[in-house]
Image (cartoon, helix red, strand yellow):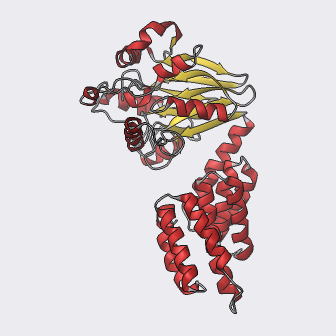
Amino acid sequence: MVSEANWSKLSAALFRPSAPDDRTFKVVCKANDHYTKKEFKLAIDEYTKALSLIRPSSDPKKSSSFSALIFSNRSASYYQCKKWAEAVKDADQVIRMRPEWPKGYFRKAEANIQLGKYDEALKDYYMAQRKDPKNTQIPLRIAKTLTLKDNQEMNLAIYALIPGRDICLHTITNPIQNKIFDFAKDMKNIIYIIADLDTRKCVVVDACWDVDGILKFVKKKGLELVGSIVTHYHFDHVGGIPPPPFDQLRVKVSGIYNLMRRVPKLSVYMHPADIPYVLKSNPGMSGLRSRIISTPDQFTMTLGNFTLLRFIHMPGHTEGSQSILVNETRLFSGDTLMVGCTGRLDLPGGNLKEMKKTLTDRLGNLEDGTVVYPGHKYGREWTTIGMEREKGVIGRTRR
């Protein structure tokens, strides 16, 4: 599978033998350069210009191949700009011109996922897989789409907010905030919104770094935020005063305290063992204790009418680390379990003995089909209990 980051370089090599003239070739190279620099709007402009320069050729197949490559790259650029419908239209052009290529189907499927058209996305992923059976990424995309479709059937929506992509976007007026946002991008946290689509009520998991951005996203989706869940007390998950030596900078990270102030009736759910540490890094929350709900092992809550959340104590990364099992099929693991690894044990609260017990007994007893949403994007955004069991990360008990 060719990554998006390397696609421009590959495209440049592919364009050279089939470009109709030097001028068009230079425009396409300029577009590819913009794409590599993540200047996607400029890339779209240049790809559009290149398409306008193409004239009828004596070799229609070569000409259409060149055009199809441009449409494919412009589709990817539209996708990055979150213009999903335009991305689908360009992908359709690729399929029309070169139906034997897998990339047109793949591009279309990716955009249709964002439009919530999961059946259509699956159809195109399966077609892409038929064209490129050795591609190891397509089965993962199919699995993710099936999960999204299953969520939809449960009236459940899960949104993953990633700093630098969905939140923590630079502003012109606040350079200090921009530095914090850069740090957030390096930390690779994932903030989750869990929503019951029947009632539009939602909770946020590990609200940190950009409360304004989180609330803006919730409003855009037409949701009502009714709770904030903490998987563990580390500052990159709850905000507040960062640990030494960063505390000397006198900078506070936006997090659950800011969220509680912005949403007056919001309840915050955290394990009792981690509450003192959260209050220490967020002293302003001491006056809001009545809105902090302690969640001991096996605590449950209902979101909306049909979405059940079960809190499972999973010490190891911190004493009060907890994971949240939604409808017994979706696990929000915080820093207890990532893709292919566990959370660090050399930080305050880390305990190797407890982590081993968590991996063997607590996580090991979950169903293989349980989808896991980790607290950081180290590689992929999701995994399953079965996948991690096969890797030997968690206990070998099979169910």
Residue at point 64% right, 65% down? 129
Left or right? Give the position of 292 relative to 185. right
- Picture layout, residue 345 above or below residue 85: above
Whole-percent x, y for residue 241 in the image: 34, 23
In the current view of this chain or complex, which residue is farthest to the front? 173
Total marks shown come to 0
Quarter of the rendering containing residue 55: bottom right
Whole-percent x, y for residue 304 in the image: 70, 22
Quarter of the rendering containing residue 308: top right
Whole-percent x, y for residue 263 in the image: 58, 18
Would residue 82 be visible to someone looking at this image? Answer: yes
- Picture layout, residue 86 above or below residue 310: below
Would residue 329 be visible to someone looking at this image? Answer: no
Q: Nearer the viewer, residue 162 or 77?
A: 77
Residue at point 47% right, 8% down? 289
In the current view of this chain or complex, which residue is farthest to the bottom? 58
Q: Nearer the viewer, residue 317 or 263?
A: 263
Residue at point 50% right, 41% down? 162
Quadrant holding the C terminus: top right
Quarter of the rendering containing residue 201: top right
Residue at point 66% right, 74% down? 51
Whole-percent x, y for residue 14 in the image: 53, 79
Q: Nearer the viewer, residue 222 or 112?
A: 222
- Picture layout, residue 8 above or below residue 320: below
